Each structure stands twice: as C-alpha cells, then as structure tokens.
Image: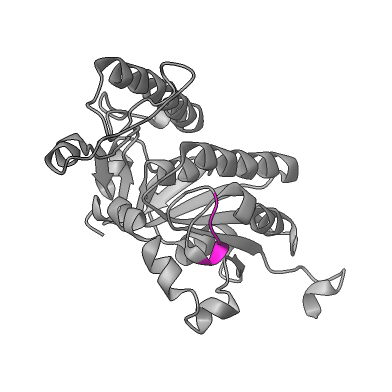
C-alpha cells in the first residue's frame, strides 16, 4: 500500500520474463514450447504491469524456429523502445541458436560460469528410407504439378539439386541471424568464428563478446537498481489438465524432437 502514496518513493521494480523451452510454432503453452502467438500477451504484460524500471529475460532454450525467435525478439525490442526500458538477459543452462537470438533482444547479456551460448547457424535434418522400401518391396507413388513440389522426399534418393536449394534457403536464414547478432552486439563482438555454429561456455562467451559478464538475475539487478528492488515474474502456468496428468501421453509423443535439441548440448 505504501508504494501507492505519491510522496513516498517506491521501490524499484523489475519484470522477470521467463523464456524457457524449445522455440516452435503451434502447440500449447503448457507443452513447454515458445512462440510469439502464445507468449505475446505475457511479454506485453511484463513491460506494462506495475510500471517496471527494467525487464529481465531469464533465457533457457536450445533454439528452434528462426521465425518465432525473430518475432519474439522483435516484440521485446519494440516494447523496450516504446516504454524506454532497459532489457537484461540472464542465461541459465543454454541460450543456443534461436535461444541466443532471444537473448540478443536484451541490451546486456549475463551468463552463468557454465552456461552454453552461441550456435549461430541453421540446421535441417531428416531421414532417408529408400533402402528400407526396396528391401521390403514397397513402391512409392507420388504425382505432383510442379517438378520441385516433392523436394527432399525421404522416400526417394536424395537429389543434388534439392540439396543445393536447401542450402541456399539456409544461407538466407543464416544471414538474417548474423545480421541480428551484429546489430544487437555491435563492437562488442570479438572473433572470426562466431557465426560457424560454434558454442562457448561462460567466461569464454564473454571474451568473444556474445555475453557481457558472469552474473545471476537477482544479485545483478539489485546491484544495478538497489537492494530494495522488487521482482514480478511472468511465465507460463501449467493447465489444470496437465496438473492432473491428462496431457502426459500427448506431451510424451511430442517431446522426442525437443529432447534431441537439448541433447546436442549435453542437457
């Protein structure tokens, strides 16, 4: 109540926006995925509710969709500019690929001594089943209007032309990612291999300019805004169905690809 009195100086407030999970379009908020449609309102509230003095992003993501990464980061920057609020990012286990794209929405990035950051690249993976089909006498029948409509069909031999087209598309996305990092990190970047998909840990990430220092959210924000700083946390809530286990089967079926993204960083 005392903070509402006009003659009493209120304690500094920091909105903490939790960005945890793989980045993918579709799905439910409770599934652990991040995308702009599901998290947009949460981001808006973090920048407006309680008249915060700053927004702190708590990032823990192995990446995912480059489009959703871009949309979320762009929303954060738009609101930061509109509200004239500083944004800080604090990396937990990992901010890699699209996860690092999210972190670049901040004015400053802080990591734990063991945090993994980077992986500034683009990857596409699939399987080929042509040998299996031949072995079992299975015939693939596909009819298209447009010779490239079935590009990278996993049920037929890989074509050099398809691979060339995919790599060209990947390069466009990679260029956008590189541009985002260069715009947001600027002269702080220090290294020739920052955009090869390499990853860095803790202090090394600071040395190459992908992070600004080693630090954790609460002590760092109190160092900046004072010991009386108050925190408002914004993050996804579990649905009632999930709390009672009604979504366990569907979540398990949808978690294979997510686990693969985390596993590549040993998590």
The one of 255 and 133 positioned closer to us in this rendering: 133
How many marks the image carries: the answer is 0
| Name of the residue lying farthest toward the bottom | 244
Where is the N terminus found, in terms of image quarters? bottom right
Does residue 27 show up magenta in the picture?
A: yes
Report whether residue 117 is seen. yes
Left or right? Give the position of 104 relative to 239.
left
Corner quadrant of residue 117: top left
Q: Residue at x 20, y 35 (%)?
A: 130
Residue 111 on image: x %, y %: 37, 53
Relative to 101, residue 247 above or below: below
Residue 32 on image: x %, y %: 47, 62
Relative to 37, residue 250 above or below: below
Does residue 94 show up magenta in the picture?
A: no
Q: Residue at x 38, y 63 (%)?
A: 253
Residue 50 on image: x %, y %: 74, 64
The one of 166 and 184 positioned closer to us in this rendering: 166
Q: Residue at x 52, y 50 (%)?
A: 88
Q: Which residues are magenta?
A: 26-30
The one of 82 and 163 positioned closer to us in this rendering: 163
Left or right? Give the position of 200 relative to 151.
left
Where is the C terminus found, in terms of image quarters? bottom left
Majority secondary structure of magenta residues: loop
Left or right? Give the position of 17 relative to 165.
right
Report whether residue 115 is seen. no
Residue 59 on image: x %, y %: 45, 55
């Amino acid at each position: 109540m005392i903070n509402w009195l006009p003659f009493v100086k209120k304690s500094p407030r920091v909105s903490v926006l939790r960005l945890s999970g793989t980045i993918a379009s579709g799905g439910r908020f409770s599934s652990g995925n991040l995308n702009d449609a599901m998290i947009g309102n949460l981001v808006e509230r973090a920048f407006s509710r309680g008249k915060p003095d700053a927004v702190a992003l708590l990032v823990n993501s192995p990446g995912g969709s480059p489009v959703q990464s871009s949309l979320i980061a762009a929303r954060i920057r738009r609101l930061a500019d509109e509200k004239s609020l500083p944004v800080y990012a604090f990396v937990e286990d990992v901010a890699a690929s699209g996860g690092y794209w999210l972190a670049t929405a901040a004015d400053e990035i802080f990591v734990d001594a063991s945090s993994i950051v980077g992986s500034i690249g683009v990857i596409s993976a699939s399987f080929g089943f042509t040998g299996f089909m031949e072995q079992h006498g299975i015939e693939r029948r596909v009819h298209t209007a447009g010779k490239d409509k079935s590009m990278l069909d996993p049920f037929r031999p890989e074509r050099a032309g398809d691979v060339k087209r995919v790599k060209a598309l990947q390069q466009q996305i990679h260029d956008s990612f590189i541009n985002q990092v260069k715009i947001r990190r600027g002269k702080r970047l220090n290294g020739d291999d920052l955009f090869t998909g390499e990853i860095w840990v803790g202090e090394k990430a600071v040395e190459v300019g992908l992070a600004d220092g080693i630090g954790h959210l609460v002590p760092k924000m109190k160092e900046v805004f004072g010991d009386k700083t108050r925190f408002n946390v914004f993050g996804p809530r579990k649905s009632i169905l999930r709390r009672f286990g009604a979504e366990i089967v569907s979540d398990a079926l949808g978690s294979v690809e997510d686990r693969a993204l985390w596993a590549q960083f040993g998590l």
